[in-house]
Image (cartoon, coloured by chain):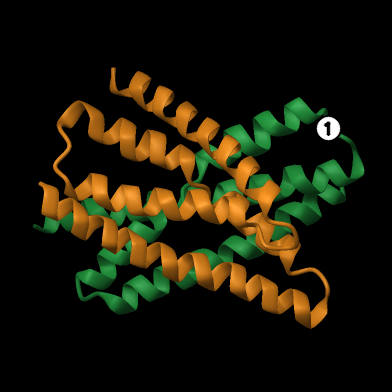
Chain colours: A green, B orange
Amino acid sequence: MEGVEALGALALVGTFSVNLLGALALGYVVGRRTVSPLPVTMFAFVAIGLLGSFTTFSAFVFDVYDLLADDRAGLGVGYAVASVVVGLIVARGGVLLGENR
Amino acid sequence: MTLLLVLVGGGLGGLTRYVVTGVVQRRVSGWWPAGTMTVNLAGSALLGFVLACGLEDPFVVPVTAGFLGGLTTFSTWMVETLAAGQGGRVGARRAGLNIAVPLIAGVLLAGLGFGLGTLVR
């Protein structure tokens, strides 16, 4: 059981990491595009295809549901709030980085 | 083999997201990024369902991590929320809505999908 829980925690960290990394990178690409135009097809490939697919909303909300259903509401709410707050901050940071390149 | 199936699933998911987002967004004018919310909520319900319904082994990971991971997106949700949040107090309220509504609905739909999946197993 402990092994299963450890695996669950590892999956949570994995989802958290790809989502934040993807939000940062997408922010960067979007910010960069405002200062130096990118070909539309290139933008579609990187922003929609690569970075859109890299991150996941479904695994994120399912993990939150799973924690809530498992009576670990504190962790579930904390994970949801942390993902969104840090996600918005790193996306904004990415935009600023891209704009100032 | 699993890796290849994940690649195909992710590609199909991303393609579906691109098409559905375009179709929905053309019908909804204004600031609300309804296209992204549509794919994200549909994907959340489907993920709950697929995880509960007892899908057999070579297909679980390609469908969940591949197709549904590709269909739904966290990064676009964040960047669209930043865009909706431009412009003072109105923007802040819009950003708040674009976070709260998909988040709460997504968790509920993931649970609903999971419940339905348990029924058909």
Which residue appears at 50% of the width and 48% of the height?
Answer: B39
Percent position of residue B21, x then y: 60, 44
Percent position of residue B65, x then y: 36, 38
Quadrant of the rendered image containing residue B19: top right
Q: Residue furthest bottom?
A: B89
Which residue appears at 33% of the width and 73% of the height?
Answer: A75
Quadrant of the rendered image containing residue A42: top right
Frontmost residue, A59 versus A22: A59
- In the visual, does A13 lie left or right of A41? left
The chain containing the residue under callout 1 comes to A
- Residue B33 seen: yes
Does residue A56 sit above or below B96 in this rendering? above
Percent position of residue B12, x then y: 46, 28
Q: Residue furthest front?
A: B27
- In the visual, does B116 lie left or right of A1? right
**Residue position marked by numbered label 1 in the rendering:** A38
Frontmost residue, B119 versus A3: B119
Which residue appears at 33% of the width and 40% of the height?
Answer: B64
Classed neighbour count for the residue bearing mark 1: other residues with Cα under 10 Å, few (<14), some (14–19), many (≥20): some
Does residue A15 sit above or below B68 in this rendering? below
- Residue A15 seen: no
Which residue appears at 32% of the width and 59% of the height?
Answer: B110
Secondary structure of the residue carrying numbered label 1: loop
Percent position of residue A5, x then y: 18, 58
The quadrant in which the N terminus of chain B is found is: top left
Does residue A10 sit above or below B10 in this rendering? below
